[in-house]
Structures are given as C-alpha cells and as structure tokens.
Image: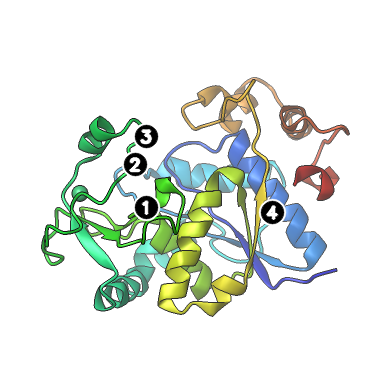
Amino acid sequence: MQQFVRTRIAPTPSGYLHLGNVFSFAMTAMLARRHGARILLRIDDLDKERVKREYVEDIFDTLDFLELPWDEGPKNYHDYQTVYSQVHRMALYQDALSALREKGAVFACECSRSALLQEHPQGIYKGKCKDKGLSLEALGYNWRMLTPVGTLPPTMDYFVVRKKDGIPAYQLASLVDDVYYGVDLVVRGADLWESTLAQRYLAELLGYGSFLAATCYHHALLKADANEKLSKSAGATSIQYLRTQGKHRRDIYALMGKMLGLAYPITHWKDLKEEACR
Ligand SMILES: [Zn+2]
C-alpha cells in the first residue's frame, strides 16, 4: 500500500464546523491512518473580516468531540495564535507573490465582485483589466493570474492570488502552506477540483515540485437533499447545533453515512472505507 508522509485538515474559522467539513476531516483521518501519514491541523485564517475567535475555539472543541485526530499543528487557541496562524507565514506568501510578479504572470484588476456578477451570472472573469496596465504597487486592486485561455476551467480563468487589501488569496496561501509543511497527500471535496487545477498551475510556475508530485484525493460531497450542497449557511448542520439537539458522536457519524448514501452503517470515522467514497 502506498505510504504518505503528511496530510492536513484545513478549516476556515468563519463559521461553526458543519457536517460537510467534518466528513472531509473524517475521510482525511481514515486515509492518513491507512497510508501512514501524519495529520497537520492548519487553520486558514487570512480572511480577517470573517474569522472569529469563537470559530477557532469551535474547531478544537468539535475535533475532540468527534475524536478526529491530528498529530501536528496547534493544540489550542494559544498555540494557534502564537505559532500557527497564517499571519506568521505572511513573508512566505509575499515571496511567492513577488516571484509571480517578476515572471510577469500577474496583472492588477479593479473590478468589484458585484461588477463581475453583473457581467456574468457566476461571476466568471473574462480578463477585462489585463491590458489596462494598472499598478501592481497600489492597494485596492486584485492581483490576477494571466492564465492562457483554455488552460484551466472557466471559473479559474485569471484567478485571484492577492486580494484588494494586499492579503494573499486562498489558492496561493493554501499552496504555499502545503509546500512549506511538506504535505504529500491532499484530501478535499470534489467541489475543490478546480482549485486543485489552479494550484497545480501556480506550482508549475513557482517550481514547487513537491506539490506537483503530491496525491490529491477528491471525495464525494454530502447532500442535504437532491443536489443541494451543504454550506455554512445551512446552520442546522453545524455540529454545535446538532449537539444542542442531543446528538452524540455516533449519531453524527451515522447521519454523515446516511447523507453520503453509504451502503453500510457507520458510527465512527474508523468505519469509513476508502473504496466507497471515491
Ligand atoms: Zn478587472
């Protein structure tokens, strides 16, 4: 069986963890223990406007409640704040952004989210600002990649690597972190398939061979009902809420199994099987 060194779980503390998140962590735990990988807890907290302390605390609390293990990374809020927050790795992200800029791989974009939505129902960006020559120095502009048309899925054309406030965007920060921590197994939902392609594109440009060699495993998504994707707005699926309703750990795993349509019952992440979830 193939062995891996390290995988990670990477929650964003902008809401309480819900069934969709913890299913992804459960899959990660199962695959890690099966393939000999250590699990890193990485808290993706660059979006300062949405991150709240109570949501960070909820991550530790919920992982403990569901007996989801992690071997590396913060064990509590203090560890997180003093050592592991992405804020402490800002210089690494800036280095990667500078490298992209030196390669002429980025351009500045002044379009607002609402303007993009007016032009396209899914907000797909068609490269409007790529020939405007806007300054890469000033804040107030997104930095977007000059992706050749047809290289990536349309939703990832000209994807953003630095946001208007100067903060690195998800695709860049997640990639830099995975390289920095030596992650060779990435487990994520099928909804992040396009992100994986965008990150591989970045990794090629930046010469991140370790990420290109990593295995990315995309698991099925839980469905609330027909074709409805779970999200944080679906508050009724937060683990905190389910606990207030008297649900125990085994009930929550059983619910996950049901929402996944598994042919066998589960009461713990250890009951998950690799084959059934591809
Ligand atoms: Zn633009």
Secondary structure category for the residue under label 2: loop
| Residue 85 appears in view | no
> Residue 157, labelled with which disc?
1
How much space separates mark 2 and mark 3, taking CA atoms?
5 Å
How much space separates mark 4 and mark 1, taking CA atoms?
29 Å
Sooner in the amino-acid sequence: mark 4 or mark 1: 4
How much space separates mark 2 and mark 4, taking CA atoms?
31 Å
Residue identifier under label 3:
122
- CB contact under 8 Å: marks 2 and 3: yes
Residue identifier under label 4:
28
Q: Residues within 10 Å of mark 3 (few under 14, many from 20)?
A: few
- Judge depth for marks 2 and 4 and give the one in front: 2
Residue identifier under label 2:
124
Question: Of residues 157 and 24, which is closer to you in this image?
Answer: 157
How much space separates mark 1 and mark 2, taking CA atoms?
8 Å
| Amino acid type at image mark 1 | Asp
Q: Residues within 10 Å of mark 2 (few under 14, many from 20)?
A: some
Q: Is residue 170 left or right of residue 2?
A: left
The total number of labels drawn is: 4
Sooner in the amino-acid sequence: mark 2 or mark 4: 4
